[in-house]
Amino acid sequence: MLFLVTDTSGRHGSAGLVRAESDHMKVVESVPLTGGTFSAQLVPQIAELLAKHGLSKSDIDAFIVVTGPGSFTGLRVGLAAIKALAEILGKRIVPVSLLEVIAASSGTQKVMALLDAGRGEIYAGEYEAGESAPHARESLLTKDELATAALGWTTATPDEALAQFAREAGIRVTVVPTPASGTIARVGWHRLKAGQTVTPEQLEANYIRRSDAEIFAKGRH
């Protein structure tokens, strides 16, 4: 199977083509995307990737897309593009949480995945071996709350600054590589085999945090 794998959740993103044969994953090619310009880069980069390898959009068997948490603008742009392509081609979409990918990269049976959420806050996802993403708990924590929430957990993050903070707070932490197309695809392949796909209409961003517009609108009532 040929997957188109996209991540527009952070300051930097990626788009890649990954082939799956049984449980073997092969990254055909992955290209970086620069945050702030996803809307201008994503679709042309996908077209260039396909053309470079002699493929067409119809060769894509499924879309694996990071749905968050992360940038509101980046996620909206990335998910809108995948929704359009999947609807036109009639292909399946596999939504993946970036926290789930970090947890899977840790090689730990019981892990709390961490990402810097800005504003002195942290995105945290609790995963245990054999537990699928819909049943994992993801939340937004303050740095003060993390020390208590992480009791009994090994944490994992690709962010060295966040890892250093965790160490100083006495939290066990593993630094994992920044999620790339191959690791995202492995999580997506597992979910696809479990039937955890969505239609374009069902694809939604996993923001965890509410947008400023929502917060300010609520405050006016």
Image (cartoon, rainbow, N blue to C red):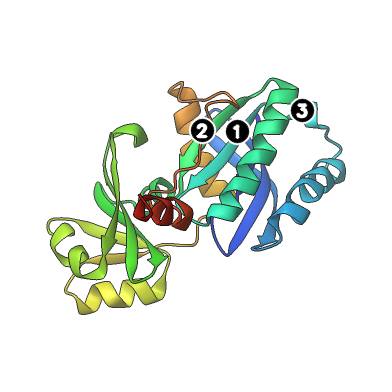
Quadrant placement of the N terminus = top right
Q: Position of residue 159 (x, y in %)?
A: 42, 69
The numbered mark, 2 or 3, whose residue comes first in the sequence reads 3
The numbered mark, 2 or 1, whose residue comes first in the sequence reads 1
Rounded to the nearest angstrom, the CA distance separating label 2 from label 1 is 8 Å
- Horizontal relation, residue 150 to residue 80: left or right: left
- Disc 3 is placed on an element classified as helix
Type of the residue with mark 1: Ala
- Disc 1 is placed on an element classified as strand
Type of the residue with mark 3: Asp
Residue topped by disc 1: 20
Q: Position of residue 216 (x, y in %)?
A: 42, 57
Q: Nearer the viewer, mark 3 or mark 1?
A: 3
Residue topped by disc 3: 59
Q: Nearer the viewer, mark 2 or mark 1?
A: 2
Does 36 appear above or below 202? below
Type of the residue with mark 2: Trp
For the residue pair 99 and 22, the one nearer the viewer reads as 99
The residue at the point 26 percent across, 39 percent down is 129
- Horizontal relation, residue 180 to residue 140: left or right: right
The residue at the point 42 percent across, 51 percent down is 217
Cβ atoms under marks 2 and 1 closer than 8 Å = yes
The residue at the point 54 percent across, 60 percent down is 10
For the residue pair 82 and 54, the one nearer the viewer reads as 82
- Disc 2 is placed on an element classified as helix
The residue at the point 55 percent across, 36 percent down is 24
Other residues around mark 2 within 10 Å, as few (<14) / some (14–19) / many (≥20): many
Residue topped by disc 2: 189
Cβ atoms under marks 3 and 1 closer than 8 Å = no
